Image (cartoon, rainbow, N blue to C red):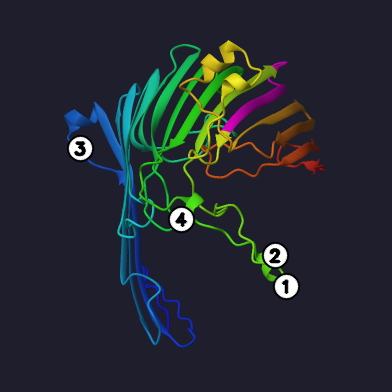
Amino acid sequence: MRRRFSFHAAFRPCLCVKAVCILFMMTGYARGEIKMPAWLKEQATLTGQAGLYGELYSVNGTGARCPPSTARLSLTPTLTFSRYFSISAELLLSTEGSSARQNMNIMGLHPVWSWGRAHLGDFSDRFSQYTFNGVNVKGAALDLFPGKFRFTVGGGQTRRAVEGTVVNQSYEQRLFTGRVGYGNRQGTHVDLIVLKVRDDPNSITGEDPSDIPFVNPDTLENPLDTLWIEPPYNPYAVTPQENLVAGLSARIQMWKNHVTLDLEASGSAFTKDLNSERINLDSLDTSDFFRNLLDGVYTPRRSSAVDYALNSLLDMNFNPVKVSMGYRTIGPGYVSLGMPSTVNDRRELLFSSALRLGPPSDAVSVEPHER
């Protein structure tokens, strides 16, 4: 039997095979404005949200699959001083974390003023679709936008070191990023973006994947074959990685914003294993400028790959007709560790159209897509 309790005393029973589970959950949220003294309220306003979640678990007849109890607390207060400065906090505390997984707790401060903002603690941002987009960082960042210029610099830890087996361990990973831009973020603008992510090979004391032989399963199909061992390397091993991404993101609006062109071009240099042999740049036909540029920024190795991603979208909105078309390609070797995940090795052609008839609430649209 499974039961759920909330402030509304809602129950949901269900049957379990060879087990009896009792689950107790409490969820509550509060939102509103906190009362303050009149003299302080004239200068500042405090608002926010709070959430509390609890769970109890027990089972008979089989081994436990969950902790006996779980609790989460979330707070998102915001303190606003007039319209020129505000500071918000983000707090999430959970009992579900452990040393065998990534840290689930979130603590961050985010002050905002008229010409800039900052992040202290946990934060996430989106510079463009294929560079820095959605990864949580435990560190700090400063974003300044005086006039039409924008300058951003930030960095911190994206993963902590977790000891484990060679296939599920995790190296400590740090991210550093910067952005220089000009223009209105919601209108015509151009941004230059640089991202550097690197694992610390010495952050864990796990086994070296090159010391673990991997048996090719194809050799076991024929008993007459001699058992063959591949060169000593485990292809499923977690290895320390390095990533350098440079990108350009731009938007151009024309004809009183009836035509909008979005462009993004990014290049990625990705090293799968920092323990692999370095490539001697002197043996390659490269210029001294290129070698000096890479020196101290990125080290090419035998496990390194270079690729690119392109994304373009043209929107034409002339009522009652709207037409959109675009082209997108992501190379098979393109990797950005500033994104939670990447579906690469793809190429798409996009087309959509809409025809508006009658008042704005009524429309007839046709949106074919070609890939």
Q: Helix, strand or loop at disc 4?
A: loop
The picture places residue 94, in percent across and down from the top left corner, at 32, 56
Res. 164 image quadrant: bottom left
Q: How many marks?
A: 4
The amino acid at mark 1 is Leu
What residue did someone put label 1 on?
224
CA distance separating discs 2 and 1: 12 Å
Asked if residue 39 is among those painted magenta in the image, a careful observer would answer: no
User: Marks 4/1: CA distance?
Assistant: 32 Å
Q: Residue at x 75, y 42 (%)?
A: 362
Q: Nearer the viewer, mark 2 or mark 4?
A: 2
Q: Which residue is mark 4?
A: 166
Distance (Cα) linking label 3 and label 2: 73 Å
Which residue lies under the disc numbered 2?
218
Please tell me the numbered disc located at residue 36.
3
Q: Which residues are magenta?
A: 254-269
Q: Earlier in the sequence, mark 4 or mark 3?
A: 3
- Is residue 81 positioned above or below 17 on the image? above
Toward the viewer: 74 or 154? 154
Asked if 44 appears above or below 207 in the picture, the reply is above
Up-down: is 210 above or below 220? above
Q: Nearer the viewer, residue 20 or 297?
A: 297
Horizontally, is 326 left or right of 229 in the view?
right
Q: Quadrant of the N terminus?
A: bottom left
**What secondary structure prevails in the magenta region?**
strand
N-terminal label among 4 and 1: 4
Q: Nearer the viewer, mark 1 or mark 3?
A: 1
> Decide: marks 2, 1 in contact (CB < 8 A)?
no
